[in-house]
Image: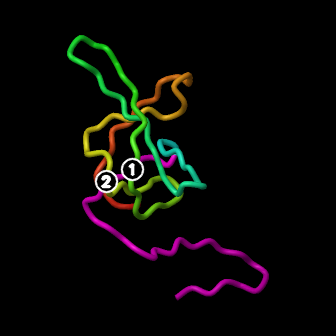
Amino acid sequence: MRLLADGTAGNADLITANREDVLLVPNAALTADREAGTYTVNLLRTEADGTETITAVTVEIGLKDGRYTQITSGIVEGDELLIGGVDAPVQRVGGRPGGPQ
């Protein structure tokens, strides 16, 4: 145990819950509707002919931290998500398995 001297400050990360083998997406990929209590992501699909479509998909969330949110339903590993609005520059992200880092 290490004690801090009087008048000094410190930072700590407290782990309050942990999950293994879960689907995580960057928090920026989520859009929250606070009034309805729902969350959506923009799902990007590329057809065989190269045509891309973007669909807003409602997802259920679990644990989250300052960078990632656990997705419990609505999308699956390997789905590509569009971060930002449809008019924003394209930034793609595939949901990744793992736990909060």
Q: Which mark is residue 59?
A: 1
Q: Does the residue at mark 1 contact the one at mark 2 (Cβ under 8 Å)?
A: yes
Give neighbour class at mark 1: few <14, some 14-19, many 20+ (Cα, 10 Å): some
Q: Which residue is mark 2?
A: 73
For this view, does 46 lie left or right of residue 92?
Answer: left
Residue at x-position 25% and y-position 19%: 47
Q: Is residue 16 magenta?
A: yes
Which of the 4 quarters of the picture holds residue 87? Answer: top right
Residue at the limit of the structure toward the left, as seen here: 48
Segment colored magenta: 1-27
Where disc 1 sits, the SS reads strand
* Magenta span: chief secondary structure: loop
As displayed, is residue 8 above or below residue 56?
below
Front-most of residues 47 and 70: 47
Residue at x-position 62% and y-position 71%: 11
| Residue 4 position within the rendered picture, expressed as x and y whole percent measured from the top left | 67, 83
Looking at numbered disc 2 in the image, what kind of residue is underneath it?
Answer: Ser
